[in-house]
């Protein structure tokens, strides 16, 4: 859920500041971009160098930059950049100032400027934590929409035992993951995407294939995972990296694509068939490399199984099925025919006519048609943006 998220980790002056290094590592591992803001007091507990190295960004401390350039760190820009701010550790002092609206540190000014979700993980001695003013302040922060990540009980730096210990970094990550998952529009849904070409072997060294790059299907898988879906990606032979959090099954041939898709279709809520599955495959596959002898070589082909059509026939009422169409004439009418013939809910019509669209490109131009005859034509866009449009259409269907 944190993949691609922009997170500000705001560190205030507590012994628990050492845990901020671990929080950054976990955030980076989860695919987030991290910028760190430190208060002056926090530098007594951990160095900016450690946190900038781990976050792969300079650490922000003051309103002005350290380098004599006379430039300033724009607190408004930082506040607007973030998808989430985590104040961890949050001292009693910082919490009180967040409540009173003070802006005498970069951390507080960014907090006041931010429009994103703010998570506060308190860390202090047990009596400070229990103090009426701290409890009142935390209550106020909650009332104002901030999220408190409760401290743990245990031995504190003072030697006393009680509540006030900054919760462990993996709990903070769990908290964030759960929060973003619950906010995600496809959370709790299973979604399967097929992507890429298939290769139909002729002999051990040759195959029949096509120019599909797999980029459209991979972009769909990535966007669906970002929206919280449990994504299974059935990928033909492409050399693309698996999007974060996506469960990938590699296949080569149309038959393998059929087996993987039909074997997994039952548990899915949404099925998107973006793969360019070969329509025909050689009847005979030579066990040895075929030597060149005759002038002509005829290869007998047989029709492959149509995965999309099979799923269309077997799908349950609550499953949404989305197919792609690549047409060169009577585009819209042919696409609608395909939608009806294969029992689809939505068909995405690809244009091959526009420069920059279709196979091997990073961009695509599509028209989305649903079963209620709703037709939306889009401009040429990046495949990532097209994936957003397609998933929006599925969610609104
Ligand atoms: N498709 C599939 N299995 C196949 C062939 C196609 O699942 N064996 C799916 C593709 O993933 C795509 C859709 O069917 O979502 C459209 O494929 P296309 O080849 O354009 O359609 P066909 O129905 O085969 O019609 P034609 O080739 O005649 O245009």
Image (spheres, rainbow, N blue to C red):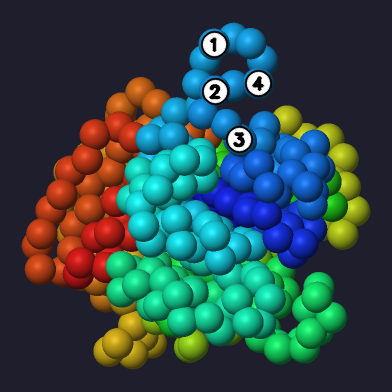
Alpha-carbon span between mark 2 and mark 1: 7 Å
Q: How many C-alpha atoms fall within 10 Å of the one at disc 1: few (<14), some, or many (≥20)? A: few
| Secondary-structure class at tag 2 | loop
Circle 1 SS class? loop
| Tag 1 residue | 70
The residue shown at (65%, 70%) is: 123
Instruction: Please name the residue shown 9% across and 62% down the image.
Output: 373
Q: As drawn, is 270 to the left or to the right of 260?
A: left
- Which residue matches tag 3? 60
| Cα distance in 3D space between marks 2 and 4 | 7 Å
Relative to 336, 168 lies left or right = right
The residue wearing badge 4 is 66
Q: Which mark is residue 64?
A: 2
The picture places residue 15, in percent across and down from the top left corner, at: 77, 62
Which quadrant is the C terminus positioned in? bottom left
Disc on the earlier residue, 3 or 1: 3
Measured in 3D between alpha carbons, the distance from the residue under mark 3 to the one under mark 1, in whole angstroms, is 15 Å
131 or 67: nearer the eye?
A: 131
Asked if marks 1 and 4 touch (Cβ < 8 Å), the reply is no
Structural crowding at the residue carrying mark 2, measured as other residues with C-alpha within 10 Å and reported as few (<14), some (14–19) or many (≥20):
some
Q: Report the quarter where the N terminus lies.
A: bottom right
């Amino acid at each position: 859920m944190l993949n691609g998220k922009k997170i500000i980790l705001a560190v205030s002056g507590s012994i628990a500041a050492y845990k901020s290094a671990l929080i950054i590592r976990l955030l980076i591992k989860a695919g987030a971009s991290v910028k760190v803001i430190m208060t002056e007091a926090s530098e007594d507990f951990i160095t900016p160098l450690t946190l900038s190295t781990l976050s792969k960004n300079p650490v922000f401390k003051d309103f002005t930059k350290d380098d004599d350039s006379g430039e300033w760190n724009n607190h408004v820009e930082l506040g607007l950049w973030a998808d989430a701010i985590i104040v961890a550790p949050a001292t009693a002092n910082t919490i009180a100032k967040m409540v009173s609206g003070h802006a005498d540190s970069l951390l507080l000014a960014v907090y006041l400027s931010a429009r994103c979700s703010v998570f506060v993980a308190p860390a202090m001695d047990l009596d400070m934590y229990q103090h009426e003013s701290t409890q009142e302040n935390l209550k106020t922060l909650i009332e104002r929409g901030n999220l408190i990540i409760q401290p743990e009980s245990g031995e504190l730096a003072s030697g006393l035992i009680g509540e006030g210990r900054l919760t462990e970094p993996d709990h903070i990550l769990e908290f964030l993951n759960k929060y973003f998952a619950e906010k995600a529009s496809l959370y709790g849904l299973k979604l399967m995407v097929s992507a890429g070409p298939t290769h139909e072997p002729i002999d051990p060294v040759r195959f029949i294939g096509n120019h599909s790059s797999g980029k459209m299907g991979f972009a769909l898988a990535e966007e669906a995972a970002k929206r919280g879906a449990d994504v299974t990606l059935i990928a033909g032979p492409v050399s693309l990296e698996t999007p974060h959090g996506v469960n990938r099954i590699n296949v080569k041939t149309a038959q393998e694509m059929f087996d993987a898709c039909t074997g997994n279709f039952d548990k899915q809520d949404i099925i998107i068939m973006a793969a360019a599955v070969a329509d025909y495959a050689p009847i005979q596959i030579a066990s040895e490399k075929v030597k060149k002898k005759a002038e002509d070589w005829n290869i007998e082909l047989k029709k492959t199984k149509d995965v999309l059509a099979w799923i269309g026939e077997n799908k349950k009422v609550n499953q949404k099925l989305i197919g792609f169409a690549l047409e060169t004439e009577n585009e819209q009418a042919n696409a609608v025919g395909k939608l009806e013939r294969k029992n689809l809910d939505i068909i995405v019509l690809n244009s091959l006519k526009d420069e920059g669209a279709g196979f091997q490109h990073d961009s695509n131009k599509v028209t989305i048609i649903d079963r209620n005859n709703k037709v939306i034509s889009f401009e040429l866009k990046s495949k990532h943006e097209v994936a957003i449009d397609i998933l929006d259409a599925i969610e609104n269907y």
